[in-house]
Image (cartoon, coloured by chain):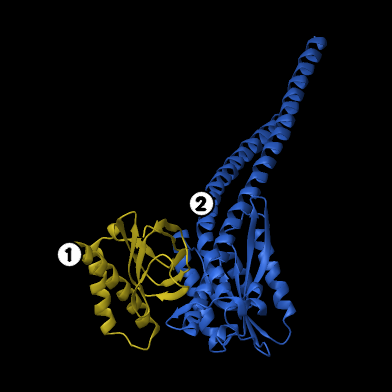
Amino acid sequence: MNDTFRVELITPNAVIAQADATALVAVGEFGQFGVLPGHTEYLSVLRPGELRLHVAGRIERYVVGRGFAEVGPKSVSILGDTIERVESLDAESIRQELETNEERLKSEDPLGDEYSRLLDRVERNRARLAAIEGEAS
Amino acid sequence: MASDLKVIRKRIASVKNTRQITRAMKLVAGAKLRRATEAAMAARPYNEKLNELLADLLSRTEDRSNPLFKKRATVRRIRIVAFTADRGLCGSYNANVAKFVDTMVAEQDGCEVEIVAVGKKIADHARRKQYAIKERLTEISPRDVEIHARELAMAAVRDFERGAVDEVHLVYQRFKSAISQVVVRDLLLPLVVPESATDAQAVSTLVDFIYEPSQSQVIDALLPQVVANRVMTAFLEATASEHAARMTAMDNATRNASDLIDQLTLEANKARQAAITKELVEIVSGAEAL
């Protein structure tokens, strides 16, 4: 099984990566899913989480914000509002932002706009941290 | 005569200063234009994929139940999101958009219009004309375009869904080339289904996706993204057009200044020659009188 499929990671600002991958793992609405060559047509909403790309025997790791994955038999498009390489992230500043936002979240009205905005940030930062820590272990 | 020469020389100096400024502005606009077109280019793949995805999705289903598709039977209130620059000195760029908005407002009989003004120039114009201004956004740095575009789009989606507005239009200048930009109006909401997706034949022949979480939920998640992306595209186009318009305007101004300097230099030389001739005549006639 040395078949590959084409993967494109695209954000509104740039094409982050294009590669021929042998496998891909991402986080969908119902949790992690994996894609191998010849996957059936599949369309998923992506939640903040880690995305792993198996390219030429190595694993490339990214963190996706929110977006969509369109899986075809030969190609996969990942459209994310943010896609970052795990290596480019700074754990310390993310942890700090996460803590202040979690604190602010406690005093916000859970039905307000500000609450959902903060919650969104918190979820993204949790996903980033989880990805970074996943690497360390 | 000598004072005449002095006046002309002073004018030459002042026009030279002006030319220096317009030339500098042209160079700055040129650099900004390059950055703006790069940003627009970088946004294109996402834009294309997103629209492709939307068309793919809609061609596999007849479901148009999402409220963002719903055309209102009677349009009572429309929102115009208009994009201009914060500053002038860019030819007719701002005036064209303002004029376009005026025409649109004049065409709406019996329906209220509210303006979302992006850029100081359209905000000032709308205030002078006493339009209802819903929101004004000025002095936006290129870094924050994405955030602002997203917020504008989300506000539009929210207000459209709860019926506060029945249509949302974008008015901006589309960047065709460095020397040509046109004012366009896009209907943002209700969303128009792309034509490729309405072909009934195609619907039955395509293999359907497996959806996660479900088809309608994927549509619900995708549509606001599409709206946000269209606002962002308009933003980027408007920015590129602004810098292109300014570059052209400043190039013309620089050329006009050069022409004026040539003309004034000629006049100065004539005046100088006249003064010399006059002096010579005076000397000669003085000598003759002796």
Instruction: Give the SS element for disc 2.
Output: helix
Q: Which residue is mark 2?
A: B35
Question: Which of the 4 quarters of the picture holds residue B129?
Answer: bottom right
Report the side of A75 relative to A57 (left or right): right
Which residue is rendered at x = 53% and y = 84% of the image?
B159
> Residue A111: x and y, percent?
37, 89
**Foreground residue among B220 and A4:** A4
| Nearer to me, B176 or B269 | B176
Query: What chain is colored blue?
Result: B
Q: Where is residue A41 drawn, in percent x and y?
A: 48, 73
Q: Is residue B209 left or right of residue A93?
A: right
The C terminus of chain B, quarter of image: top right
From the viewer's perspective, is the residue at label 2 or at label 1 nearer?
1
Mark 1, other Cα within 10 Å: few <14 / some 14–19 / many ≥20: few
| Circle 2 chain | B
Indicate the colour of chain A: yellow
Q: Secondary structure at mark 1?
A: loop
Q: Is residue B92 above or below residue B58?
A: above
| Kind of residue sitting beneath label 1 | Ser
Spot occupied by residue B220 in the image (x, y as percentages of width and height): 49, 82
Residue B12's disc number: none
Q: Residues at marks 2 and 1, common chain? A: no
Residue visible at 55% across and 53% down in the picture: B37
User: Do callouts 2 and 1 mark residues in contact (Cβ within 8 Å)?
Assistant: no
What label sits on residue A137 in the rendered view? 1
